[in-house]
Amino acid sequence: MDPNLDQEEIAMEMQQGTNGAITILRIPMYIKEANRSLFDPRAVAIGPYHHGNQVTQDMEAHKDRFCQGLFQRLGDKVNYQHATAHCTKGALHCYSGHVGRYSPFMLMRDAGFILELIFRWVIEGSIHSDNYVRLILNSIYYDLLLLDNQIPFFVLDRLFNIVKIHNPVFNDTNLLDLVIQFFNHDRSFSWANVNSNYPNANQVLHLLDLQYKLAIGNNPVIEPPLDNIRFSQNACFNICCRWNMPQGIPGANKLKNYGIRFQLNNDQQNKMFDVTFTGQTMMIPGFTINSGSKILLSNLFIYDQIIESLLGNNFFGDNQIEGQEGNNVGAVISYVVLMKALINSGDDALVLQREGILQNLLSNEDEVASFFNELGKCIMADVSDHRYNSLFNDVNMYWRNRFNCHKYLAIFRKKHFKNPWTCLSLVGAIMLLSFSCTSMIFAILNYTRARGY
């Protein structure tokens, strides 16, 4: 597939695939051109789309050694050619783009490298035996989660089953458990909910798809009812303002000035997308932003758009997130829309950082705002019906209400209590006003006594 094709052409080409088996698409070129550091591999190329890239050439010899190490575990029990034919059957049909000279043997080498890497890390802890791989392991970790740097998961599953049959060490081992341990260990960054029910291996399309399913697993976006905020000062405002409600919301700094409080959701840290607004408090699960989380969120974001707009809402069957009725926008897309609205500038990021919601490991707060603003430009579909619509409405109803005393009290506090000097000036003004009033009262009393009233 030409990476410059638009959505309609991509969808038509997908329909021409083999029995709907196309599961690995290329990211549109106009998105990649502005964000290559987020979507192109830095250390290892997996699959046909980045095969032959000059940047990843140094890793090819190490891939060969790792694949050889995997088959050395089997001795002479397995014929490499027969295993390749069995494991890669139908796999190249899963790619929407041209595979070029990428052959089944190259695909087998990539699968062998991934399995051996996971075996050495999770089971043996001997990744240090290859100093080069150990040095760039963090880059390899995120390269394996890039959207168009994937191989079909069933290739890994078939190869793992061969290993289990011929090597009793792996008899009691589950592939999904190994993969999840590798991508969700303590020193890695992940939004996967490892406490949720795992999907079956035959439901997983590739490694990024597994992370996606674990991230949205047990993470239904339960939106509060639209009328959960009631302003007794002007009941008709809640009814009338809904008809002229803007689709966006102000940034976090401005909302704080209007009296909205931001609070870390400690009880549901694994539920990344469970953001709620009740009363005047917005509860947000904590998240860390660093170079790795930028890569993971960006690829999950594009992948969410692909499965929603191109593959259809029934693609995942029972694993689909339950949102509000009639809502077809994915959870990751909605989350990016929310973060883009809240973080427009470095001051907005600083508000969330001070509340413990945002752990910023980038150079400064402006870089956080720039990331979400640039990522928001990668939206390829209509997101007006996103999953935080009712939250947006409730927030707008709060800060736009002219009879909301909490808002004016917050503005008063910000203006007169933001530092000791403004506080002292306010106290001085109050004392001066008190003295003036007292003097006026005594003057009136003296005048009335003099007049004999």
Image: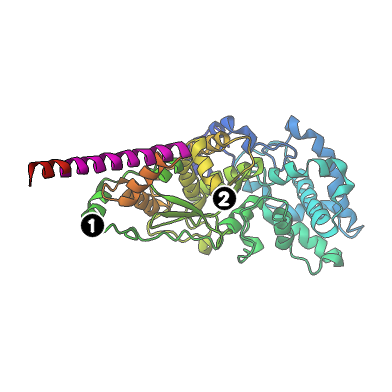
User: Which residue is depicted at the point 63% across and 50% down?
Assistant: 208
Which residue is at the front of the view, 158 or 19? 158
Q: Which residue is mark 1?
A: 235
Image position of 217 with respect to 128: above or below: below
As drawn, the residue found furthest toward the right would be 76
In this rendering, is residue 274 above or below 384?
below
The spot of residue 213 in percent (x, y) is 59, 57
Q: Is residue 33 above or below residue 140?
A: above
Return the x and y of residue 358 as percentages of the image width and height: 57, 47
Closer to us: 425 or 391? 425
Residue in front for this viewpoint, 318 or 447:
447
Which residue corresponds to the image point at 57% horizontal and 50% vertical from the top-left?
356
The kind of secondary structure element at disc 2 is: loop
Q: Quadrant of residue 229?
A: bottom left
Q: Which residues are magenta?
A: 420-445
Residue 436 forms part of the magenta stretch:
yes
Residue 31 falls in image quadrant: top right
> What percent of the width, then of the height, locates residue 371?
55, 37
Q: Which mark is residue 308?
A: none
Q: Amino acid at mark 2?
A: Gly
Give left or right: position of 103 versus 236: right
Q: Which residue is mark 2?
A: 356
Give the answer, above or below, for where 157 lies relative to 371.
Answer: below
Q: Secondary structure at mark 1?
A: helix
Comes first in the chain, label 1 or label 2: 1
Q: Residue at x 70, y 50 (%)?
A: 188
| Residues at marks 1 and 2, CA–CA distance in whole angstroms | 35 Å
Residue 267 lies left or right of residue 326; in this view the side is right
- Label 2 crowd bin: few (<14), some (14–19), many (20+), radius 10 Å: some
Asked whether residue 174 is drawn in magenta, I would say no
